Image (cartoon, rainbow, N blue to C red):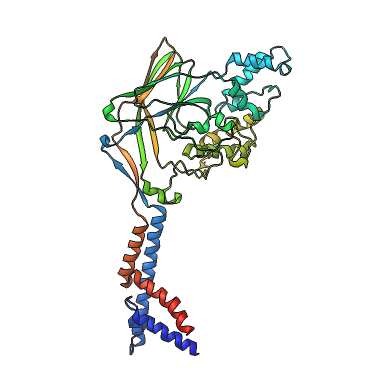
Amino acid sequence: MQFCTYLRKFIVKLLKTTSAHGFQHVIKVGAQIVERIFWICCIVICIYGMTALAQRTWDRYQTSPVVISMDRNMYLWNTSFPSVTVCPHRRIDENKVKQYVQQNPAMFVGDGDTDDFLEFVVKLANATYDTFANLPMHKTYGIDSADYMDLISNLSLQFLPQISSATILPLRSQQTVTELGVCMTINSKIADYNSYQYWKNNRWDLVSEPQTVVVHPLDGEVYGQLNKLESSYEVYFHGYMEVPDISEQRYLFLDSFYTTVELLALELITSTSVKELSISQRQCRFSFEADALEFSPIYSYNLCRIECRMRLALKYCGCIPHFYRNRGKQGKLRYRTCDFEGYRCLGVNSDALITLRQGNKAIECKCVPNCDDSNFFVQAYKAREWFLGATLQWGLTDYPKMQLHRDVIFGLSDVFVYIGGLGGFFLGCSLLTFTEFFYFLTWRLFKETTA
């Protein structure tokens, strides 16, 4: 009873000294019960309104604190030069196949085994989701499916086209493994992570990134060129921090043609202040945020989709194609590589695997876009017969007149300002008022009750 009396006096003292409006009227001496009920209702309504709007403010900070704006002053920025991945149709060196047969005579004892083995390797090297359904069962000569990629790498035709460009920095090339097989990527910062040698050596370290190749409207028309492409080929155009994806647009060009491709560019640049936000807030990932991926030390949107496709292939058929890295970080995961029977299974489910959709429903991959992204679109291309072999020329003719920027528009400081304004609007109080309440109900109450 004595404690209740003391607590009542303490609360009255607190409400008398607080700077929040309305509380003094509740405890005013001589006030009638109707007055007290009125002011209590007003205070409750104000606290509810302040809390509801503060919750909306916090939700806004959690869901949409960034804005994408347009910059149209094209002479104030540089544009990254488009990267290209070239996948030749002729991938296997017949002389290497003959040497392999001679070095392993116990594997090839039947008549016609050499030609049959060549057919096997060629089919394997050119197998993709588009062709899995039509891939016939074939004799594998005792070669385990886990060694398919190693076999293709050892028997691959050396693909080293001559590269020339009018860019200030030279265009760098790297052999990479894609969902179309072994290809060559030009002007990429992440192609090294998809090279078979990087996989084979079980590497997970970050390589030193080359300097970004950029162009400016004052540079005029700038092209890159690949000479002496010895067969027909397929081409992906993409940004320097991205890899090809089987579902994206690709272009088929024939041999003995000089092909010129004109591209349009659209880039999205993210400010450094956005890094302070969580991934769920900004809805994008930087390349160094690869914790969501199991088979790559860096992140990109297409690499995330590739891993999603791997998991889906494993779910449908219990194996993955040979052109994927089958060992996860720290060796924790190791997926089985498909044999020809597994490829037939993947072919049956190829539509879902390519589109990552089951019927009209998208498969949840939890992949978010790249924070810094470069997109290139083919504006036009033309080809003419060329007596010096296949040649590909690509570049920007019309420089982008717009660049997108992702910036923070509603930061944590704005949250405090908004919530503080709501407290002042509804209760006429400030942060110091809330501090007083906290002080009185904790330390002051504890000190006086123990005195």
Q: Is residue 285 above or below residue 82?
A: below
Q: Is residue 60 above or below residue 123?
A: below
Q: Which is more toward the observer, 366 or 197?
A: 197
- For residue 140, which quarter of the picture? top right
Question: Image check: 92 left or right of 280?
Answer: right
Residue 404 in view in this figure: yes
Residue 261 in view in this figure: no
- For residue 212, which quarter of the picture? top left
Q: Is residue 382 above or below residue 346?
A: above
Question: Image check: 68 left or right of 193?
Answer: left
Q: Position of residue 93 (x, y in %)?
A: 57, 16
**Residue plotted at (35% across, 64% down):** 419
Q: Position of residue 26 (x, y in %)?
A: 35, 82
- For residue 444, which quarter of the picture? bottom left
Q: Is residue 263 above or below residue 300?
A: above
Q: Position of residue 394 (x, y in %)?
A: 38, 23
**Residue plotted at (41% across, 51% down):** 276
Q: Residue furthest top?
A: 387
**Residue plotted at (57% across, 18% down):** 92
Q: Which is more toward the observer, 280 or 153?
A: 153
Q: Which is more toward the observer, 436 or 402?
A: 436
Q: Position of residue 50 (x, y in %)?
A: 36, 67
**Residue plotted at (50% across, 31% down):** 192
Tally of marks:
0
